[in-house]
Image (cartoon, rainbow, N blue to C red):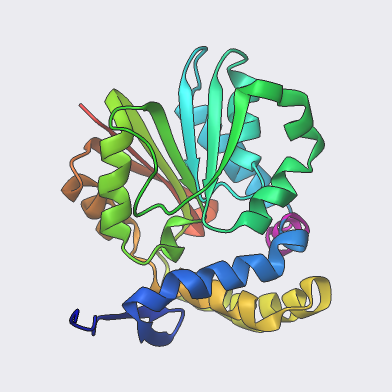
């Protein structure tokens, strides 16, 4: 008889059993998969596209590189990476198969042929060998992982020496008044948009709550260093609504 796991974790503002969070997150993204890209455009007024382009500018993809995009969903980051590095290859991994199905249906995916793979998998237990990838990206997904520290350790494991981690995630505005204004928008408008556009208010309330639970820029940079990465830096985007974190496996 095995001992019951009594650990708990956050699921938005709720406290849930540690081993239940992944299934709850899978449920959220399964529910919104078909309207996920549309909601991203509406919620951010299209600014998420500029953030992802800024990610690529800093990442500077090179020909021949192999990318692992974790929580890659419908492929936005992988498409951008491959567009900038024509002979590169990318693997999109996501916990939620309906998100990958939506990604494979996009016109960009159909044009990339054998340069792009889609894998159902868990950021905390990557199904890849050590030192397999040149670049690891995760965009708006790390905050949904049950064990962020475990996911970062896995990222370090699968990167080759000299490989790079880059994380794009919602963050904290370093101005209390502006943060309060943004919170008013987030908590009052985004769930209503989710109800109207995706037919799912609760999932978008969770997504807003999960942003508020996520560590701020400096604390998250410390977690990346703790996982073994060097030269850890971050850049705020749109005054800190989102942030890019970069680290290297030296």
Task: Give x and y (percent) for residue 161.
Answer: 25, 23
Task: Give x and y (percent) for residue 199.
Answer: 79, 78
Identify the residue at horizontal 68%, vertical 75% (top origin).
190
Is residue 220 toward the left or the right of residue 134 in the image?
left
Identify the residue at horizontal 65%, vertical 32% (top origin).
79
The image quadrant of residue 244 is top left
- Compared to residue 237, the image places residue 191 above or below, namely below
Nearest the viewer among 26 and 163 is 26
Quadrant holding the C terminus: top left
**Residue 173 appearing in the image:** no
Residue interval drawn in magenta: 37-45
- Compared to residue 152, the image places residue 43 above or below, namely below
Task: Give x and y (percent) for residue 73.
Answer: 61, 50
- Compared to residue 143, the image places residue 89 above or below, namely above
Task: Give x and y (percent) for residue 16.
Answer: 38, 85
Nearest the viewer among 240 and 104 is 104
In the orientation shown, which residue stands out farthest toward the front? 1
**Residue 58 appearing in the image:** yes
Magenta region includes residue 40: yes
Nearest the viewer among 152 and 57 is 152
The image quadrant of residue 22 is bottom left
Identify the residue at horizontal 65%, vertical 66% (top origin).
30
Is residue 239 toward the left or the right of residue 118 in the image?
left
The majority secondary structure of the magenta stretch comes to helix
Magenta region includes residue 238: no
Question: Number of numbered discs present?
Answer: 0
Identify the residue at horizontal 70%, vertical 45% (top origin).
103
Quadrant holding the N terminus: bottom left
């Amino acid at each position: 008889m095995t001992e019951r796991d009594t650990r708990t974790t956050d699921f938005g503002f709720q406290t849930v059993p540690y081993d239940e969070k992944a299934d709850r997150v899978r449920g959220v993204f399964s529910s919104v998969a078909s309207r996920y890209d549309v909601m991203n455009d509406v919620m951010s007024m299209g600014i998420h596209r500029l953030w992802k382009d800024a990610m690529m500018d800093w990442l500077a993809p090179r020909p021949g590189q192999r990318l692992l995009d974790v929580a890659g969903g419908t492929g936005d980051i992988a498409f951008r990476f491959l567009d900038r590095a024509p002979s590169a290859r990318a693997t999109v991994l996501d916990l939620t198969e309906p998100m990958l199905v939506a990604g494979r249906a996009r016109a960009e995916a159909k044009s990339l042929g054998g340069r792009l793979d889609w894998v159902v998998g868990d950021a905390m237990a990557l199904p890849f060998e050590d030192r397999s990838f040149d670049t690891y990206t995760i965009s708006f997904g790390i905050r949904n992982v049950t064990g962020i520290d475990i996911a970062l350790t896995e990222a370090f494991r699968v990167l080759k020496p000299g490989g790079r981690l880059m994380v794009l995630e919602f963050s904290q505005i370093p101005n209390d008044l502006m943060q309060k204004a943004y919170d008013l928008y987030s908590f009052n408008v985004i769930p209503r948009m989710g109800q109207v556009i995706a037919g799912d208010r609760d999932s978008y309330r969770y997504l807003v709550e999960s942003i508020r639970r996520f560590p701020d820029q400096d604390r998250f940079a410390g977690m990346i260093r703790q996982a073994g990465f060097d030269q850890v830096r971050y850049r705020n985007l749109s005054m800190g609504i989102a942030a890019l974190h970069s680290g290297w496996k030296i």
